[in-house]
């Protein structure tokens, strides 16, 4: 079992940057594929980015390619999402997610554990 806690959300102007962090409480964090999803008001939760258990591979949604970077530090039990060139349409609650049996969890049904989310608001 793993518990996830996000931090780093906030209010930023269009074109700005934020770095989200996800702290995991598990001695076997290195076994989990990690991902970030987001959910805007009135919309379904959608995939943003994922990284494999050892960090050797990653995947991104088309709408964040070349703007967001996913990373992890297994020694610290941490996952990160660096978000650059933020746009108002990036406004959402961002969730950290973990999957024990999926290398790159890019759909909600492949996720085993969720964090509580952190709000990101981008003003125009």
Image: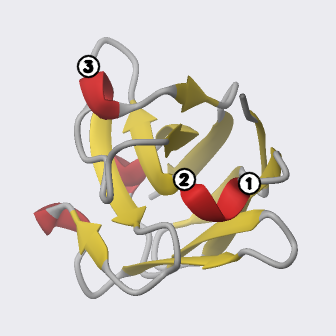
Q: Which of 100 and 43 is in front in this view?
A: 100
Residue 12: image location, x then y, percent: 64, 62
Looking at the image, which residue is at 72% across and 51% down? 9
On-image quarter of the N terminus: top right
Q: Mark 2 points at which residue?
A: 32
CA gap, disc 3 to disc 1? 30 Å
Circle 2 SS class:
loop
Image colouring = secondary structure
Q: Mark 1 points at which residue?
A: 28
- Rendered residue at 26%/19% (across/down): 44
Task: State the SS at label 1.
Answer: loop
Mark 1 Cα-neighbour bin, 10 Å: few <14, some 14–19, many ≥20: some
* Residue furthest left as drawn: 62
Could you tell me residue 43's position as x and y percent? 26, 19
Q: Going by the image, does 7 lie left or right of 115?
A: right
CA gap, disc 3 to disc 2? 24 Å
Could you classify mark 3 by the number of other residues whose Cα lies within 10 Å: few (under 14), some (14-19), or many (20 or more)? Answer: few
Q: Is residue 28 shown above or below 47?
A: below
Residue at x-position 37% and y-position 42%: 101
**Alpha carbon distance from label 2 to label 1:** 8 Å
**Number of callouts:** 3
Image: 2 above or below 82: above
Residue extending farthest top: 42
Pointer 3: what residue? 44
Q: Name which quarter of the figure residue 47 lies in.
A: top left
Instruction: Work out whether residue 47 or residue 106 is closer to the camera in this orientation and state it.
Output: 106
Place of residue 98 in the rendered image (x, y in percent of width and height, measured from the top left): 53, 42
Please tell me whether mark 3 sits on a helix, a strand or a loop: loop
Q: Where is residue 16 in the image (x, y as percent from the top left)?
A: 56, 78
Do callouts 2 and 1 mark residues in contact (Cβ within 8 Å)? yes
């Amino acid at each position: 079992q793993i518990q996830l806690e996000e931090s780093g959300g906030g209010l930023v102007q269009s074109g700005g940057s934020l770095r989200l962090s996800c702290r995991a409480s598990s001695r076997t964090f290195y076994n989990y594929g990690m991902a970030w999803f987001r959910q805007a008001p009135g919309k379904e939760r959608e995939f943003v980015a994922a990284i494999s258990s050892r960090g050797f591979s990653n995947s991104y949604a088309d709408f964040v390619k070349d703007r967001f970077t996913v990373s992890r530090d297994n020694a610290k039990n941490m996952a990160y999402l660096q978000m650059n060139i933020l746009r108002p349409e990036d406004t959402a609650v961002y969730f950290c997610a973990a999957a024990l049996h999926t290398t790159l969890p890019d759909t909600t049904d492949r996720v085993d554990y969720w964090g509580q989310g952190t709000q990101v608001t981008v003003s125009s």
